[in-house]
Every structure is written in C-alpha cells, then in structure tokens.
DNA sequence: GTTAAGATTGACAGCGGCGTCAGCGCCTGC
DNA sequence: GCAGGCGCTGACGCCGCTGTCAATCTTAAC
C-alpha cells in the first residue's frame, strides 16, 4: 500500500477524553445537534482545536449512510461552459461538507443507464444535471427510479418535480431581435442551435416572436440550422451570405457559431459590423477573443450552477426547496453589431 | 435527512452467505488478492452478480484507510487548459476504483497552506499538481511535510523526487523559431509569458536559442512581456507593431496572447499573414476560432495529465514509477504564418 | 508413505463515527 | 412536597469492510 503519513490523526475518542465527555457529545457538537449545553460545547470545541481534530469522512459516511459527495453531470463539450458550471457548483459547496465529483459524458446515450452505476460506485448523495443532459428522458427516469436526489440546470422538458434553475432563453432571443431592430435591421438571419438542445427551440421561438413583434416578415431562407459548433456556424454563415438578398444581421444561437459566421464574413469580404451585424449567445470567452468582439447574451451559467447546487443541498438536508427558479440574463453589446447601413457598399 | 432509496443494497455478508464462503474470501476476490482458488472465485463472482453486489466505498475507505479519491489541483484560469487536464486525468481513472476531485485555486498563495487541510477534509489519497501550481515551493513543501503522495505535470522547478510528466517547452519554442526562419523571417518578436510560470522562461530560452542558431540578432526591442492573457497580448502586439523597424513575425507564448496580437494587427491595419506572421502556443480551441487560425504548438496537456495521474496511481499502489517522463509536442501550422514579404506594402 | 512448505480459508477485532435508548438532574404545575 | 416533562448526557451496538493470524488443506520432495 501507499506510504502513510507518520502522524496518526486524532479521533473522536481522543477529543471526548480530552474534553471529559462521551464521544456522542462530541458527535453532537460536530453535527450541530441540539441539546448540548454551551459550556460543554465550548469544552469540546477547545479540545478539538487543541488536538487538531477533523472528523473522519469515511467513518461519517459509513455510519451516517451518506457520502457528502455530489456529482455534476454534463455532456457539454464547451470548456468555457463546463468550467463555469464547475465554478458555480464549487462556489456553493465552499464551506460545506459536501465535495464535488465531475461527471463528464460524451453524450446522453453514454450517460443513460450508467448514472445509477456511477452513483453507487462513487456513493453519490445526489447529482446536478446540466443541459442538455438534464433533458434526457432516460437519464432523468433512471435517477427517479433509483431514488437519487437531483437538481437540474436550465431544463426545458418538464415532467420532473426535481428542483431546477433556468434562464429565459425565449425572452433573451427576443431581446436580441429587439436590439437589432432598434439598430434598423429588417433582414435578420438566424443560425439555429442543435435540435437535441431544447434551449435551441426556445431561442428560435424568441427570434420569431421578436420578428413578429416588430412587424418583420418571416423568411425561411434566413433560417439556417447549425449544431452549436464553430464549423456549423461557418457553413451557415456562408449560406446566408450567399443569398441574393442577404441579411444585414445574423443571430447565431451560440458564440462558437457566431465566431464561425464572423469567419464566413471575412472570407466573403463582408465587413462587420459595417455590412453585417452578428450576435452570439452565451458570452463565453470566445465572444471577447474574436474580432470584433461579439454582442451576445450573457448566460448566468455560473449562477445557475450555484443555485442548482444549493437546491440539491437543500433537498439533501430535507429543507424547503423552491421547485423552479428563473435567473436574469443580460444582453452584452460589443463591437459586432451596429446600425444598418442604408446603402450597402459593394 | 435525505430520502433514501427503498432498496437495501446487498453487503459482503450476503454474498458470502450466498457463495458459502467467509466474508474475507469475498473481500479477497474483490481486491484481487492472491490465493483464492479459481473455483471459489467463480462462486463468489456468481453470487455477487446474482445479488447485484457492489462494495461499499465508505466501508472500504474506513477499514482500508484510503479513500480512493485523488485531487487535481490547478490555478490555471484557462478553461480549455483546465478541461484538457481534467479529461486526461479522468481518462486514466476510467475503470479504476479511484475517483477525481477537482481543486481549483485562484492562485498559488490561496493554495498554500490549505492543501493539507483540504486533503484531510476530503480524505484524499494523493494529488496531481498542474502548472504553475506544481512549481510553487510552499505547496510542494506542504505536501512533502504531510506525506501526501503527489505527481506533477510539466514542472520546471526541481528539488522534488515526486514523479512528473512534462514536455520540452524550450525545444518547442525553438521549433517555432525554426519554422519562422524557414519562412524567411529575420525580425521575430516575442510576447513572453507571465514570469510566475516557469514554462515562460523555458520558452523564452528556446526562442533565443533559435535566433542564435539561425544567426539572427537578439534585439531587446522585440522582446515584450505579457501575462498569458488576451489583453496583455493585445498590448504587447501594439507595442511591437509601433516599432519603427517592426517585426515580420511575432511569437506569443500562448494562444490567448496570440489572439491579442491578432487584434492589435487588425487595428493597425496590418494583414496576417501577409505583413505579419503570428504564432501561438498551446493549441487551445482559441487557436481554431480566430481568423486566421493560429499556427501554434500543440501541448499534450491531456496526455500529460493522463500520465501524471497514472504515475500517482502507481505511487499509491507501491509500484515502480519512472521519476520523469517527457512527452512529445507538435507544431501545428495553420493560416497565421506565411513567407516573409520581401517588400512590405504600406 | 511421511513431512515440510505452500496454498487456501475463516474467525475475529477493529476502522471512527452515528442512532437508539436509557439515565439523571432540574423545572413546572398542582 | 410530588409527579411528569424536558434538557442534557453517555453506553453501546452497529455501519460494511480490511488486516491479522491461526487453522486446514494441498502438493511435492524425501
């Protein structure tokens, strides 16, 4: 076996002896149980500090039948997204006893059926599900079936009474159209997101609702399909820019695709934002690294992850949990959008 | 407490009873201990399958005095880097009993002194240290002091006999210069990395060595200091492009800074790669998202993380561990570099 | 056929906590 | 002054598994 530290850590028995109480009382103090006289509590705490006592996680897990481990499951390939997710979850866990296990999956199919095995193998107390995994029926059903508590981030499918934290994709997409319309754009193209992401549909609906609200016609030519990847955005951009009556603005349903559109514009010699305004979605770091920087919707991913983790903790502690929460988004206007040029120069 | 699954999981005793052996024998089978007759082993395995038995992690940890948890500690802010790191570590852990806890730190100062507390609180068996944290003397000393096994990824400071896996930064930087020199560049600027990253020094040395090898003069004006951030790259780029005798190529010591240089070039009306070649380092996804795509050094981050994790596991299992490993890098040539233009047009 | 060295197996004592329940002192109400 | 109730505390039995060590069974050499 591995080399062990020479120092033997003190145990609950040591503390009990030092404080002149029983181990049960020490246990009470460390678990914030009621019915411990303040004086006794202080004695225990003092002894614990003195001995540098820290409860043994494994023993607690074994006796208490809970691991204090929660999983963060996702299948999103974007590093920025993933890190935001993790950061949010860790934010919430900071100072708590719970620890975080990251559970990346290649895709929903991979996750399906394995969730329970993983949860058991790792002894998870609960799971936070990020999109689009949180909308995978099989995965959710599996969790329900084995009774593992979970919370979801920005789910779009219902049918679960687990708590969730979301943002209003539809409304945000609508805000994008409002922004473009205010700049005078009348031909606004869209690069839709991957169909397996339910958010893609919400954004698309918001786009259409926005057009209608501004009295703009809906034109199927302006609606292209992407897959949330840079390449798909690039191709969609080429297609849109090749139209005889091309759009003066393109709304890509995430930043990666918006970056792709930007590239298509460079290639076609279309200047941004002079001849074409481009809007992304997510406010990932890509948005600030391309030129010009992207006008985009800032998704509160980190906040959502934090709140969802909080909801899961509440669930685990048998506290009251609000079933649904909606967090605000933000339209971040940068250099990739500008007023429409009345007479396009070319 | 949290709602518990209605099903009670079977225990080692159940399996032992079903197989007609003692619990110790079951334990032997599940721990791959020697001296179990194949026939017995099969009986145990069959019973375990029948009962859907899975060893209880907490009990194992408590009795075996090891948690099967390893930490991945880093302070690198780049999501791409972080995710590569995690993916590599998880790659190696796949199929093992060990699980991964991610331990992000804001900076080395934050990590220092807390490492031991975290390790104890979470019951870590060992830690994988990523750069630049792995070069933080205080952190390393702390781990040594408390006897916690660890492995390092791409360390540049010595003084530790812990295993490490690295790549040859110096040689890679040298390869960048070779590439540029082969394209005819004679004035090659550099945007150095943050001084706290020891790799920054190695890359800088490689750069200088490359210049010397090609008989190119060393010019202090061409050496600028960045901080591995987009913004610092942008500013360094502006500075270099403002020189009266400006460079025809710029080597930025990471991709973020290279993206910044690209932006500075756009602003200055300098075309890339026509008037200026730009090279990055890391091959993060930024390299493929900017325009033109970056010629860069592909760092085998994922591979290094995988190997370092493997080394740590070997350490934990008391196996033989090669103290140092060096993994190959790769020069990825994309659109941001080209032959020097004899007469710059401007 | 006998015997010592292995190979195989099991009994049992923890690992370090938490849950249960009983014990005891003190306060309240009558 | 007494009974009942509540607040506080401790004894003790697990939780499910691994380490130790002794017991038993094989196997191979003599």
Image: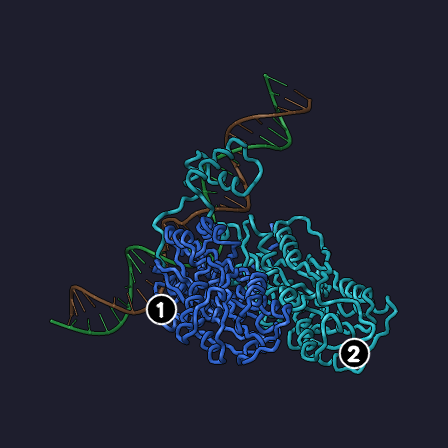
Chain colours: A blue, B cyan, C green, D brown
- Chain bearing tag 2 is B
* Disc 2 crowd, CA 10 A, few/some/many (<14, 14-19, 20+): some
| Depth order, front residue of A221/B219 | A221
Q: CA distance from mark 1 to mark 2?
A: 75 Å
**Label 1 CA crowd tier, 10 Å (few <14, some 14–19, many 20+):** some
Q: Where's residue A315, x and y in %?
A: 37, 63
Image spot of residue B171 (x, y percent): 78, 62
Q: Quadrant of the C terminus of chain A?
A: bottom right
Q: In this rendering, is residue A300 above or below A110?
A: below
Q: Viewer-proximal residue, B320 or B282? A: B282
Name the residue tied to disc 1: A36
In the picture of the structure, the residue carrying the numbered disc 2 is B246
Front of the two marks 1 and 2: 2
Residue A162 shown left or right of residue A187 in the figure: left
Label 2: element kind: loop
Say yes or no: labels 1 and 2 on the same chain: no
**Which corner quadrant of the image does residue B84 belong to?**
bottom right
B332 left or right of B220? left
Image location of residue B16, percent across then percent down: 44, 38
Mark 1 lies on a secondary structure that is: loop
Q: Residue furthest front?
A: A244
Residue B117 visible in the shown view: no
């Amino acid at each position: 076996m591995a080399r062990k530290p020479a120092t033997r850590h003190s145990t609950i028995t040591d503390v009990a002896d030092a404080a002149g109480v029983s181990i049960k009382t020490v246990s009470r103090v460390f678990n914030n149980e009621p019915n411990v006289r303040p004086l006794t509590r202080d004695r225990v705490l003092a002894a614990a500090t003195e001995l540098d006592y820290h409860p043994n996680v494994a023993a607690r897990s074994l006796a208490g039948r809970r691991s204090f481990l929660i999983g963060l499951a996702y299948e999103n390939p974007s590093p920025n997204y993933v890190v935001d997710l993790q950061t949010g979850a860790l934010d919430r866990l900071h100072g708590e006893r719970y620890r975080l296990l990251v559970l990346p999956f290649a895709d929903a199919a991979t996750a399906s059926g394995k969730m329970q095995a993983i949860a058991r193998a790792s002894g998870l107390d609960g799971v936070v599900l990020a999109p689009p995994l949180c909308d995978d029926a099989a995965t959710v059903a599996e969790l329900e079936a084995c009774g593992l508590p979970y919370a979801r981030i920005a789910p779009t499918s219902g049918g679960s009474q687990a708590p969730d934290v979301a943002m209003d994709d539809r409304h945000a997409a609508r805000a994008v159209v409002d922004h473009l319309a205010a700049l005078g754009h009348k031909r606004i193209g869209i690069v839709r997101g991957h169909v397996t992401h339910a958010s893609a549909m919400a954004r698309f609906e918001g786009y259409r609702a926005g057009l209608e609200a501004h009295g703009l016609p809906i034109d199927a030519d302006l609606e292209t399909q992407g897959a949330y990847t840079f390449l798909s955005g690039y191709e969609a951009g080429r297609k849109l820019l090749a139209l005889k009556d091309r759009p003066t603005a393109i709304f890509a349903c995430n930043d990666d695709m918006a970056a792709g559109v930007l590239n298509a514009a460079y290639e076609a010699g279309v200047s941004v934002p002079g001849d074409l305004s481009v809007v992304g979605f997510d406010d990932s770091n890509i948005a600030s690294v391309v030129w010009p920087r992207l006008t985009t919707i800032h998704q509160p991913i980190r906040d959502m992850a934090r709140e969802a983790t909080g909801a899961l903790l509440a669930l685990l502690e048998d506290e009251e949990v609000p079933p649904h929460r909606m967090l605000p988004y933000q339209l971040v206007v940068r250099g990739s959008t500008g007023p429409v040029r009345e007479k396009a120069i070319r």
